[in-house]
Image (cartoon, helix red, strand yellow):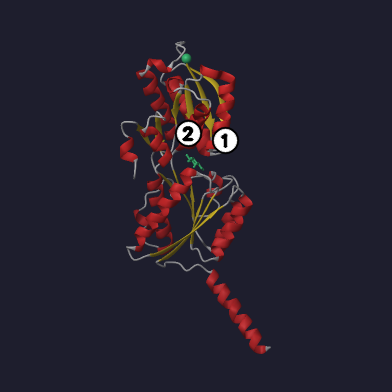
Amino acid sequence: MAAGMILCMSMQLFCACSKEPVYETDQIYVGVTYYDQSDTFLNQLIDCLKERLQDYDEEGYETTLLVREASNSQRTQDDQVKELIDAGCNVLCVNLVDRTDPSEIIDLARENNVPIVFFNREPVAEDMMQWDKLYYVGAPASQSGVMQGELAVELIQSDPLIDRNRDGKIQFVILEGEAGHQDAIIRTENVVETLKSNHIEIEKLGNGIANWNRAQAQNQMLQMIGQHQNKIELVLANNDDMALGAIDAYEKLNYTESALPVFLGIDGTDVGLEAVRNSKLAGTVYNDKEGQAEAMAKLSVALVSGKGMGEIEFEEERYIYLPYSKVTGSTVEEFMGR
Ligand code: GAL
Ligand code: CA
């Protein structure tokens, strides 16, 4: 029995030790959890992160990456964070399911002293103040809306045929990302503002929330075409997948090319860029996944190893925003195969 007790105690000790993340080590165990596996942009961003972390292996670090997807459930994600910490992760990269509900995750991380790099779904400022080892990597949402608006302005000004019914106004619809997502809200506001401030007369015929999703966008678009038939002249989508879903809807209805509205997306995913190249999408706005992945990798390595933190430039000490770029048919090649 005594032997059993000793074994038991030493096992507890062992467990207690292995739970403590070791700091200032060159062994970087990155635990990633993201909101849903169906998201095209995030799947590509996480592939980039894998590559960028591997680059650090050549610099003498030993990196390991564990990835979980939360199937759009914050509960599931909270459990995953616990599991990742238990598995020995010494830094976490978290793409929140519900960006207003990170408290559970922050508590877990703080108790175990594991820093968090939130990415793409920005927590609200108050939550970022909950602990000093919380960071955010993303992109300035308003810029993407403004750029999409500028792309639309350039097209409308250079091609009078976009105003199909020649009434001097551009009839448009918007396909929006998730309700409550910073990118959906801000992109929508800014694209419309940019059209107005450039003196384009616009008339909004409708909008649909399609949660960044191609199939949902197709459905929303089918409904809007049903309501407005040939009146739609411009389709503004908060991301490429939804722009492609809108195109799918027109293809399903066998619209001829000359009867189609103009489509604009945001992201520059592989499928998005391909669609710009063959002129299905008039343009997109590049969401710099390589830059974001690089920032996440660099920050993760610095947080764990204690090296290189001084070289990282932050906004308000804990935010990193990578700029967007406009993509059109004439610049698309620059972005392909980045
Ligand atoms: C946006 C991106 C969308 C989607 C979303 C998920 O930045 O443009 O395509 O990935 O993030 O949070
Ligand atoms: Ca018109």
Residue under label 1: 216
Q: Position of residue 337 (x, y in %)?
A: 34, 44
Q: Residue furthest top?
A: 167
Mark 1 surroundings: few (<14), some (14-19) or many (≥20) residues within 10 A = some
Q: What is the CA distance from the residue labelled 2 to the residue labelled 1?
A: 11 Å
Q: Position of residue 113 (x, y in %)?
A: 52, 62
- Name the secondary structure under disc 2: helix
Q: Residue at x 45, y 67 (%)?
A: 23
Q: Position of residue 128 (x, y in %)?
A: 53, 49
Give left or right: position of 76 versus 157.
right
Q: Earlier in the sequence, mark 2 or mark 1?
A: 1
Q: Residue at x 42, y 27 (%)?
A: 149
Amino acid on which the number 2 mark rests in the picture: Leu
- Name the secondary structure under disc 1: helix
Q: Is residue 159 above or below residue 104?
A: above
Q: Residue furthest bottom?
A: 2
Residue closer to the observer: 122 or 292: 292
The quarter in which the N terminus is drawn is bottom right
Residue closer to the observer: 261 or 212: 261
Q: Is residue 105 above or below residue 40?
A: below
Residue closer to the observer: 143 or 76: 76
Residue 228 in view: yes
Q: Residue at x 39, y 22 (%)?
A: 153
Amino acid on which the number 1 mark rests in the picture: Gln
Q: Residue at x 55, y 28 (%)?
A: 221
Q: Are marks 2 and 1 in contact (CB under 8 Å)?
A: no
Q: Is residue 32 above or below residue 228?
A: below
Q: Position of residue 207 (x, y in %)?
A: 56, 27
Residue closer to the observer: 211 or 228: 228
Mark 2 surroundings: few (<14), some (14-19) or many (≥20) residues within 10 A = many
Name the mark on residue 25: none
Name the mark on residue 244: 2
